[in-house]
Image (cartoon, rainbow, N blue to C red):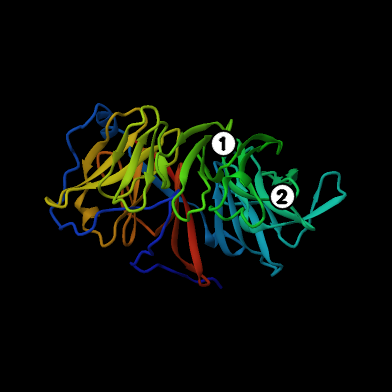
Amino acid sequence: MRSRTRPGSAVAAGLAVLAVLAVLATGCSAGEEVASTAQPTSPAVAEAVAAPSVVVGEPQWTTLDSSLGAAVPAGVGERSILVRGDASDGSGPALQVVDRATGETRWERTGAQPLVVGDGADRVTLDLSDARLGRDAGLPVIVPYAEGRRRGLVALSQGDGTYRWRWSPPAGLAARTAGVGSDVVVVRVAPPGRVDDPTGRPDDVSTLGLDLTTGEVRWRVDGVAGAAATGGVVVASVPSTASGAQTVVLLDDATGEETWRSPQPGYFAGGTDDVYALTVPGQAGAVLVDAATERVEQLQTGVAAGSGVGGDALLAWVEADHESGAVELATLASGEDRPVTAALPATVLTDASPRLLGTTLGHVVVQGADGVWLLDRAGRLAGEQVPGRLDRVLADGLVLVTGTVDGAPAYEVLGLETGP
């Protein structure tokens, strides 16, 4: 019998969305409810204020729906949820693909089952701990495999789990999946002892884009280590002998072409089509970089968080005046020449530990002590606080930790829709 308990009010520090967290200013005095009708600071504000609110739907999938033990949603696409956990028969790790609309299991595979590949002559063992899901319904699930001393990736159909293709790195090199982009899987390739280490010489590290449909190498960039794929852009770094912050490089995931290189070492925090945020060690806030004009702005307070590059991407951060105590939400969308600012509601300001964690559907996601809020760009709350601890922000939803099941974290996948 599975038991479920609600989490305590303390929120664990260290949640990550993309590469960083954005920490809301602390030490703000409680005050009366703030009316979130700030005067527009750019022409885009009028549209932002009038934007439709976001409606949080019922859970599309929860841990309680899974037949796997210690189930974790490892990926959420447009129509599928990739679930990792322990097989019910005790045979070890298992992987499921669940229909996002109905919650029904499409297929399941355990690590103990060898996969027949090619013409049927070869059988490989799957490493289910690092499986990745293509966002679109027609794209495959990418899973690392082993065949003796040989390592690589296989693609399985998202619909029924059948074998699609196999890829292996050149002899003597190891590979790690950095992320799944719009139609490529991004792979970091390096000598075995270096593939997981961001420091060292850049001349023996490469980043590859494999076609998700065929597994063929579409592009290769030497000297950079791919770290993530988001919104059509690959986030990579240039390895160096120094530990810590690296030079950040952005690549077009369709061609591998470099679109931007950070002017100073740091960590990628998110971006729109043309403005990117970078956190820099030793500086209080983030650095905003306009890739087109090379304009650089230093944010004095907080760290910017974003939903990724492209589409409806939005950067958000908090601006605080420590002398007056005023705290404002600032957002910047692609094509805007200056941020939209709005007062934060007192409900958020007086929370025990509010943190700005990301953006989705033109809204900002804020974690409070007992749940998650969604705010529009005018600083207005979109509905009630959703109980739980944020695990990740999706392009059209949220993944929350809502309690425990048999001592393991309990997850819910919630869909979001824009309302009138």
Query: Between marks 1 and 2, how big is the CA–CA gap?
Result: 21 Å
Q: How many marks?
A: 2
Is 171 left, or right, of 5 in this rendering?
right
Q: Is residue 9 above or below residue 294?
A: below
Identify whether 162 is placed above or below 93: above
Where is residue 192? Give x, y as percent: 67, 55
**Residue identified by numbered label 1:** 182
Up/down of 294 relative to 54, above or below: above
Whether tag 1 and tag 2 are in contact, CB under 8 A, the answer is no
Q: Circle 2 sits in a helix, a strand or a loop, which is it?
A: strand
Find residue 297 and report its horizontal and vertical position in percent.
Answer: 29, 38
Residue 143 left/right relative to 372: right
In the rendered structure, which disc, 1 or 2, sits on the residue that comes first in sequence? 2
> Which amino acid lies under the numbered mark 2 shown in the image of this protein?
Gly
Front residue of 292/345: it is 292
- Work out whether residue 50 or residue 216 is closer to the camera in this orientation and state it: 216
Callout 1 environment at 10 Å: few (<14), some (14 to 19), or many (20+)? some
Task: Identify the secondary structure beneath mark 1.
Answer: loop
Q: Which residue is mark 2?
A: 152
